[in-house]
Image (spheres, coloured by chain):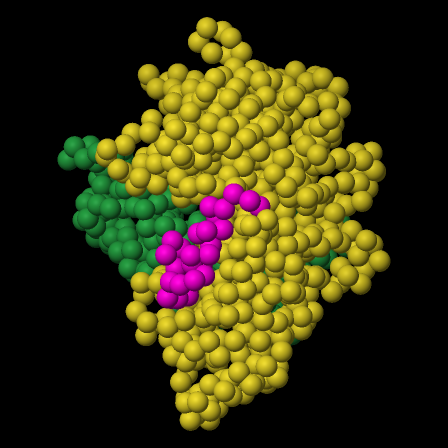
Chain colours: A green, B yellow
Amino acid sequence: MYRYIIRRILQFIPVLLGVTLFTFVLMRAIPGGPFDFAGDRSLPPQIVANLEAKYHLDWPMWKQFTSYVIGDDIFGWEGGSRGVIRGDFGPSLHFRGQQVSDIIAVTLPVSAQLGFMSLLLGIIIGIPTGIIAALNQNTWIDYISTFGAVFFLSVPNMVLAPILIWIFALKLGWFPVATWGAKPPYLLGFLPRLEQLNADYFSHAVMPVFALGTAMAAGFTRLTRASLLQVIAEDYIRTARAKGLRERVVIGLHALKNSLIPVVTILGPAFATMLTGTFIVESIFGINGMGKHFVNSIGNRDYQVITGVTLIYAFVLVIANLLVDISYAWLDPRIRYD
Amino acid sequence: MRKRLLTLFSVLIVGAMLLSACGTTTETVIETVIVEKEGETIIETVIVEKEVEAEIQPVTLNWNWGTEPPTVDPSLATDTTSVDVAGNLFVGLTKFHPVSGEVSPYLATEWEAGEDADGNQTWTFHLRDDIVWVNYNPVTGETVQEVDADGNPRFVNANDVVYGAKRTVNPETGSDYAYVTYIIKNAEAINGGDEELTLDDLGVVALDDYTVQFTLENPAGYFPAIAGMWIIYAMPEWTINEWGEQWTEAGLIVTSGPYSMESWIHGGELNLVKNPLWVDADKVQIERVEGVMIVEASTSFALYENHELDSVGVPLPEMDRVKADPVLSLEYYSAPTPCTYYYGFTNNKPPFDDVRVRAAFSQAIDRQLLIDNVLKGGQEVATTFAPPGIFGAPVPGTVGLGFDADAANASLQSYLDENGMTIDDFNALDVVLMHNTSEGHARIAAAIQQMWADTLGAEVRVENQEWAVYLSSIQNSSPLADMPHIWRLGWCADYPDENNWIHEVFNADSGANRLRRESGAFDALTVAAAQAQDPAEREALYLEAETMLTEVEAAYAPIYHYTTVAVTKPWLTRNYPPLGANDFFNWTIDFDAKLAAQGQ
């Protein structure tokens, strides 16, 4: 098992390098550079040249990439990059004077807090609902939960979020309209400080977490239900029942654990997506998360920011997938890694 | 090291909890401090306890910046948000009057034009001597006047202005807007990296501590307007040298304007606090500006309805409701903005290489209909490029091609007859209208496409591209085959003079020439107008230039002049400066009324 984990961790290196290269090349392949325009107007070539020289975009591609990955000092190049391998994601090209690492340090914790709570809500609502629906297949309970799941899956956050604001913030006044309850500095760099963990923090979180969490829960419900129904029909469940085991043990111990494999499989990518930020919900609720940087930095041609946030996403994703793979061995004894 | 910091951190937090539990007057606050660590000086945010006195709420404006300003460094600012913040933190030589838009005194009390020994035009500005450089200390909450190495207080002087101008022109600074300074002697060459010139050759010099003189490449009557722009604000050389690019962070930044920076959480909020050492501090009523960065217009509007913002823009979907609502309609205001929306024609691409086709397409646009039914924000019909309020702009409606269906048809018919074509032959040419991807532009394009079909019978295909791709598609250098026949762009004033409009945008010799016009009489006119000394003569030349470009050549189709559409709470008295930063220091709030509305 340990050898497997170490091997997997070593595989991260080429994967992350590949992601960096792919993002790097793809962004530069799009027409238009970061300094071709300022707002609504295009800039004279001389100005563009000055800016490209300042940020070393006039270097050949291979040199820019090497500088980005391992830094400038190794080859004695001018320019202050210490390289991604040493945690330097470079300067933002759009937000002048800001380092990408700083942008991530401010926005990622907010996205992670929001994403974690939403994921938790999704799991807490989704999986039990799916189980109940499966155990009561083709009854009114099943129909209601299926209807609820389809409903929350189909209503996009772009619609749900403003409706939530209108009803619960403007009309009822139960929750604040927008913004997030915690501000930097964060506890351990990503958690809200203890004195911020108050009613105000959670009342800010309710609506965005609900908007994100319900869609997530709906997905989990559908998946858990389908998977459990399939497992219940398996031979070993029939065997367990034939042995005379109580229904609670059959479902709780034998069926449920096994049926969770598809759910855990999508948990990996869901974890990475939720934690690194969601553009629409963060934007509508005015939350200073990382989601906006995935979208806006492409329009801004902010090469360093898009590469930086993509790398963070890829990093969380490979870690989450590793955890998922490890958990398979626990969920299904037939799966072995050594 | 890290472990010890962590322990310290935990102790602080526990301590803070204990203290707050005891119910003393001590509060935990976040503070930005500058510390020495591992031989490096860094800025850190820490949590400390602080004695707080009985709280009197300062008069606070709740504002939405709309987005994270990409910078607040005057040399680097390009967008309205950055300019808005910078304009409140720093003083310029001149300032646009918030109501009339005229150039008025600010750091400079008076100025005059002259001529140097070589016959170049000079502008000499006489500065006031009582504006101080200050630093707001977030730890103590105090605004402290800056002192120099000898302990003398620093006042904003001519050298700071010279430094600011040189810094913008310096190619290493990487200033996007440096091109606006190219009117200054040698600026273009130095910014272009000319090795024979140094920054000292730039045409700006401090004659004494409070007199600064600019020497220009060409005479420019509009220079006092440029002198008020952010790129040549006075800047604090010592702070910029000490902190480098980080100098604009809260706690470090040294400012000269009516407000100081209280805090800046990137992407989240940027708060300003009144500068008590400002010359007219007694007259500044708003003590704090709490600025959030909500991008979504509908959310911003919801915050307004919940009394959490004092003045916001109106999102298009809310426009009809705002106008009909008995309360909101009273809070609604639509102010003209010096910006113009236009469709450019590719003047060398058939069939738009013929003036009759261009004129027909321009005259077939019913601009008022578009404003009333699509834009809905009280915009003004544009028939020329520069809007009212810009020096040299024609009186609205007197020049240019407005909506005229008969004239448009006659014009197109004359072209078709001469070439022996029918309208079907014309439609076979596959005319393309392109805009950058945006819901707003798409609605306008769809409406105008329909007008062309209804009035002329002309069928036009609408395409859109992402902004940066779009800009490179419609460049002068892109292949003619890829260039759309018609494309949209907008232009907003940097300074209120026709030179910034018709010359900088459309002059085929000096501008980007996206219209792909042949240089001719028009281009000579705008150059002559910029250099003419007599204002009346300049106005006459610009009138001729505007007429030639829109009427005679019909090189492009101006469509409308923008408006700012906002709602403002009754307790806030504000203005709508057509140019430059919002001058919060001239605004007032009936704070009791505001608190009452918020239920406090």
Q: Give coordinates of residue A118: x percent, y percent.
A: 54, 52
Along the viewing direction, whichever of A282 and B530 lies nearer the viewer: B530
Q: Quadrant of the C terminus of chain B?
A: top right
The answer to whether B548 is drawn above or below residue A104 in the figure is below
Along the viewing direction, whichever of B93 and A317 lies nearer the viewer: B93
Q: Quadrant of residue B107?
A: top right
Which region shows up in magenta?
A: B506-535
Q: Residue at x 16, y 32 (%)?
A: A76
The answer to whether residue B286 shows anywhere in this view is yes
The answer to whether B426 is drawn above or below residue B212 in the figure is below
Q: Quadrant of residue B399?
A: bottom right
Number of marks: 0
Along the viewing direction, whichever of A187 and B553 lies nearer the viewer: B553
Q: Residue at x 46, y 27 (%)?
A: B213
The answer to whether residue A203 shows anywhere in this view is no
Q: Is residue B524 magenta?
A: yes
Q: Quadrant of the N terminus of chain B?
A: top left
Furthest-top residue in this view:
B150
The answer to whether A150 is drawn above or below residue B297 in the figure is below
**A287 on left or right of B39:** right
Q: Is residue A123 magenta?
A: no
Along the viewing direction, whichever of A267 and B258 lies nearer the viewer: B258
Q: Give coordinates of residue A93: x percent, y percent.
A: 37, 44
Q: Residue at x 67, y 36 (%)?
A: B584
Q: Residue at x 32, y 71 (%)?
A: B480
**B470 on left or right of A196:** left
Q: Give coordinates of residue A182: x percent, y percent.
A: 57, 37
Q: Give coordinates of residue B144: x percent, y percent.
A: 57, 16
**B3 on left or right of A287:** left
